[in-house]
Image: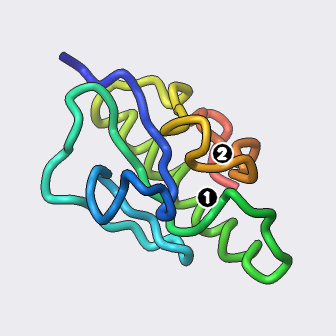
Amino acid sequence: MPYQGFIIHTSVCPSINGKGFDFWIDASGTTYAAPLLTDPEYIHLCLEGDFGKPLTAAPQAETKEQIFAACRLILDLAALYSISPAIVKPHNDSCPGPYFPWNELVLYPGDGYH
């Protein structure tokens, strides 16, 4: 069965606990892959940080790098696995949090990276 899309997590989610994600994106945008994909239906990306709280001015530059890395990874994986890059869902109602910058995701290859 092909992958249906992507699930976004945050590192403070209690269900993550060091597992349950396929790719980890740290605050600087560095991406780490798990040895195996964990879910036959969705690819799970975990972003370091707490998006349940408003972002302060200081980490916003780092957050931009992290979101850029997530966008690039989603587009690359979408092309590799023939998934629509527009199918990106939150893990649940509280993860990745109400302050996750969903509007910053650029998920159409024609739009390019910014």
Relative image position of residue 15 (x, y in whole percent):
37, 51
Q: Which mark is residue 23?
A: none
Q: Nearer the viewer, residue 100 or 112?
A: 100
| Quarter occupied by the C terminus | bottom right
Q: Which residue lies most toward the bottom here?
A: 58
Decide which of tag 2 and tag 1 comes sooner along the chain: 1
Q: CA distance from mark 2 to mark 1?
A: 7 Å
- Give the secondary structure at mark 2: loop
Please state the horizontal and vertical placement of residue 72, each as a whole percent of the image: 50, 52
- x 63%, y 51%: residue: 113
Front residue of this view, candidates 98 and 68: 98
| Circles 2 and 1 in contact, beta carbons < 8 Å | yes
Reply above or below: 28 against 79. below
The answer to which quarter of the image holds residue 44 is top left
Whether residue 87 sits left or right of residue 38 in the image: it is right
Q: How is the image coloured?
A: rainbow
Which residue is at 43% across, 51% downward? 73
95 over 33 or under it: above or below: above
**Image x and y of residue 57, in percent:** 85, 77
The residue beneath circle 2 is 105
Q: Name which residue type carries label 2.
A: Leu
Mark 1, secondary structure of its residue: helix
What amino acid is at disc 1?
A: Ile
Residue 38 x/y as whole percent: 20, 43
Q: Which residue in the protein does label 1 denote?
A: 67
